[in-house]
Amino acid sequence: MEIAKYLVDQEGGQPLMMCERHAKMFEFIMMENDKPHTIYELEDEQIADEYPCMACHLDDITKPKLILPN
């Protein structure tokens, strides 16, 4: 799971903290659909290890888990 380095915001939406990979994908999707958005790059002193990327965290939660019998 990556550390969040960007704060992304879409018009009328909740701001999200994302890693560079997910922030770039967010920007691509918004620009392709002509949606208003803002991306703030966080300063080094604003980045803390306790703030993981929300998209990476969601991916970890929704990832299927394989349980094998003994």
Image (cartoon, rainbow, N blue to C red):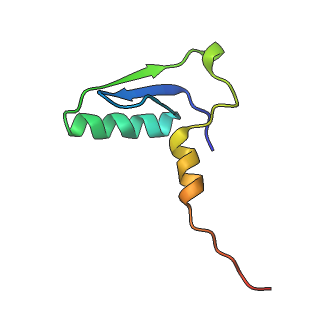
Given residues 40 and 24, the one toward you in this image is: 40
Image point 57% across, 14% down: which residue? 43
Image point 53% across, 35% down: which residue? 19
| The image quarter in which residue 52 lies | top right
Left or right of residue 61: residue 55: left
- Vertical order, 19 against 47 (above or below): below
Image point 25% across, 34% down: which residue? 31
Given residues 61 and 48, the one toward you in this image is: 61
Q: Residue furthest bottom?
A: 70
> If the image is split into quadrants, where does the N terminus sit?
top right
Where residue 36 sits in the image (x, y, percent)?
25, 27
- Vertical order, 60 against 14 (above or below): below
Left or right of residue 38: residue 62: right
Q: Residue furthest left?
A: 34
What is the number of callouts on the image?
A: 0
Left or right of residue 12: residue 2: right
| The image quarter in which residue 51 lies | top right
Where residue 15 sits in the image (x, y, percent)?
44, 28
Where residue 29 sits in the image (x, y, percent)?
30, 41
Given residues 41 and 35, the one toward you in this image is: 35
Image point 50% across, 43% down: which residue? 55
- Vertical order, 58 against 37 (above or below): below
Where residue 10 sits in the image (x, y, percent)?
33, 29
> If the image is split into quadrants, where does the C terminus sit?
bottom right
| The image quarter in which residue 35 lies | top left
Q: Residue furthest right?
A: 70
